[in-house]
Image: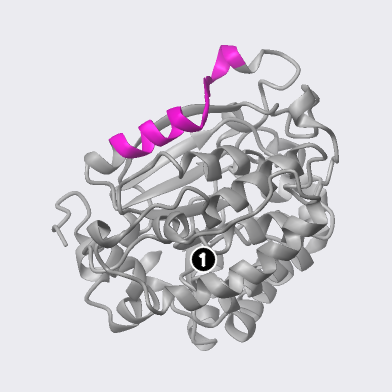
Amino acid sequence: MTFNFRRPDSYFAWKNKEILKRFSRYKDIIDKNKLARYIIAKSFECNFNVDASLEELEQLLKIKSKEFKNLLNEEPSQLENIEIKNKSYLELLETLAYKYLRECIFCERMCKIDRRDGKKGFCLIPEESYISSAFLHYGEESVLVPSGTIFFQGCNFSCVYCQNYDISQTWKGKKALSEVAKRINPQDLANIAEQLAKQNALNINYVGGDPIPNIHTIISSLKFQTSNICQLWNSNFYLTEKSLNLLIDIIDLWLPDFKFSNECALKYCGIPNYFEIISRNLKIIHNKGSGEIIIRHLVLPNHTECCSKPIMEYISKEVPNSAVNIMDQYRPEFKSYIYPEINQYPSSKEIKKIKEYANDLGILWEPVS
């Protein structure tokens, strides 16, 4: 693994035994000792009828997902040993994604509108995907840099303090998507990912806004990607179980947010049942996915008791193998002035309190925070 002179902590993080243990497969992909999951999915033959009913394809997915997990235990370690199948497991995932797009249930808002027919739900993203930027990011967690980040336009949240508000929401109802972002198809997205891989990115980092409305484009793009590189899901993680089932076998590393109690999520982001949905999804990827997870927890001012502590307690009990980035980067942005309690920076005492609480619970946070 090449030493990263821009971020020396990215080198020293890999000296931590727990980091090596919890992110062993990711490290093996970086070192070319293992293959990214999406490549194995393309080599896993899966015959199906594209015109089969949604229920039939979902049932087949359950069967093939179990077979895929068994295949991972016997996977070839070199790209040249892989044979890409004409009808693969990845194509089954793609077919289901586009069927879900007919009555969109990608996120838990479940707008159930036909995006393939030009309709738009809460996120206002049509069938086509739009990106605002793509570049090598050196500001991500230590073990991720340099990260090949691809920022999608649009979001299924409406956070009043959003720091990426220009990407997520301020354009809504004011400007056309084509005025603020570049429209892409799956081949375009794959080309961008391949360019980032050639620039020595350690991962392809799908972010935004949020990548959830773009699940179909992302999965479809993997047919055209060829580099053995980690696929990283960087998201608010408010996705349905059905859409998570499309991703769980092909995402190598997970970077989900976990910020709020239910009450605070509804107040600041207009999101119902937040805690139950995020905790459910975290448990699924911890127990059934790669299990290689860095949870981002943004410490909000005046929210240590209602949000930070319960989240730390959940993580320590239910997803103990994950690492946590305890983030002190909150700053009052966008419409945070509406709420005096968050129209300020978190205090150093609050940050220290949560870090000490995480220590008491045995949470691994320091190497990635």
Image position of 195 (left or right of 235) = left
- Number of numbered discs overlaid on the protein picture: 1
Task: Return the x and y of residue 324 as percentages of the image width and height.
Answer: 49, 69
Residue labelled with disc 1: 351
- Tell me the residue at 20%/64% (across/down): 11
Q: Dot 1: within a 10 Å radius of its alpha carbon, few (fewer than 14), some, or many (20 or more) residues?
A: many
On-image quarter of the C terminus? bottom left
Q: Is residue 226 above or below residue 25?
A: above
Q: Is residue 191 magenta?
A: yes
Kindly tell me whether residue 301 is visible in this rendering.
no
Give left or right: position of 150 versus 146: right
Which type of secondary structure does the marked residue at label 1 adopt? helix
Most foreground residue, 195 or 282: 195
Percent of width and height locating residue 278: 70, 63
Residue 209 sits in quarter: top right
Q: Position of residue 216 (x, y in %)?
A: 62, 41
Does the magenta segment cover residue 310?
Answer: no
312 over 231 or under it: above or below: below
Q: Residue at x 74, y 38 (%)?
A: 101
Q: Amino acid at mark 1?
A: Ile
The quadrant where residue 248 appears: bottom right
- Specify whether residue 139 is in view: yes
Residue 318 percent across, percent down from the top left: 63, 82
Which residue occupies 66% across, 78% down?
Answer: 314
Look at the picture and state if 320 lies above or below 277.
below
What residue do we see at 41% from left, 79% from top? 73
What residue range appears in magenta? 178-195
